[in-house]
Image: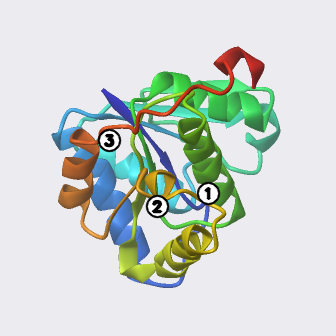
């Protein structure tokens, strides 16, 4: 089993973000869950990888060629896969994993998280898609998503697809017990 972790290539301003990234990597390895991530050794990305490696965990990085120089590739990971595009990166990460966790991050983290969540909504996969809500980072986003339901732009069943916890053990347990909603497949995966 492997989980993809999306997170920032920066550390953020609070030490809790860095600590949570490293602790998540350690927890995945201790639970025999491989880590799939963006392949860099900087920011939270590097910390989650280092955490998994410190516990002898499997770490697979997926990095586009054009980011290879910007996001310096982690040289100690189990395997680094270089791809041509961001879309190919996400598709490869999806193909390698059994679930998704978003740690704190910026635009890229949100884009990756929402694409995986949208694929789940469309029935393209039935994997858990989770937010590790460290230091209340995602509180405002969760409120926005709840407002989407209240305003009629999102079904409650699709809101409930998001696994959320501020505790790593709790999050991993919820992901383990996740059951995808029984929704129709609107399109085939080959069409994306």
Q: Give the CA distance from mark 1 to mark 3.
A: 22 Å
Q: Callout 3: few (<14), some (14-19), or many (20+) C-alpha neighbours within 10 Å?
A: many
Secondary-structure class at tag 1 = helix
Q: Give the residue pinned by disc 2.
A: 103
- Residue 113 picture location, percent across and down: 58, 51
Q: Give the CA distance from mark 2 to mark 3.
A: 18 Å
- Residue 9 picture location, percent across and down: 61, 60
Marker disc for residue 130: none
Q: Give the residue pinned by disc 1.
A: 109
Residue lying at the far front of the rendered structure:
152
Q: Are marks 1 and 3 in contact (CB under 8 Å)?
A: no
Q: Quadrant of residue 108?
A: bottom right
**Left of 183 or right of it: where is 10?**
right
**Which badge, 2 or 3, is on the more N-terminal residue?**
3
Would you say residue 39 is visible in this rendering?
no
**Left of 167 or right of it: where is 2?**
right
Q: Give the CA distance from mark 1 to mark 2.
A: 8 Å
Q: Give the residue pinned by disc 3.
A: 53
Residue placed at 23% from the left, 40% from the top? 176
Q: Callout 1: few (<14), some (14-19), or many (20+) C-alpha neighbours within 10 Å?
A: some
- Residue 130 picture location, percent across and down: 41, 53
């Amino acid at each position: 089993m492997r989980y993809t972790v999306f997170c920032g290539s920066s550390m953020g301003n609070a030490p809790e973000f860095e600590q949570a990234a490293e602790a998540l990597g350690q927890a995945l390895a201790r639970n025999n869950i491989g880590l799939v991530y963006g392949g860099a050794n900087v920011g939270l990305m590097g910390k989650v990888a280092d955490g998994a490696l410190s516990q002898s965990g499997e770490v697979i990085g997926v990095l586009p060629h054009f980011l290879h120089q910007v996001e310096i590739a982690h040289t100690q990971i189990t395997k680094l896969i270089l791809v041509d595009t961001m879309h190919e990166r996400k598709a490869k990460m999806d193909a390698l994993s059994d679930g998704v966790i978003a740690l704190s991050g910026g635009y890229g983290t949100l884009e990756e998280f929402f694409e995986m969540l949208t694929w789940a909504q469309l029935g393209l996969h039935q994997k858990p898609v989770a937010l590790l809500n460290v230091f209340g980072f995602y509180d405002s986003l969760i409120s926005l998503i709840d407002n989407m339901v209240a305003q009629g732009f999102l079904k409650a069943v699709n809101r409930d697809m998001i696994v959320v916890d501020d505790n790593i053990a709790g999050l991993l347990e919820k992901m383990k017990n996740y059951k995808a909603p029984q929704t129709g497949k609107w399109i085939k995966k080959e069409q994306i």
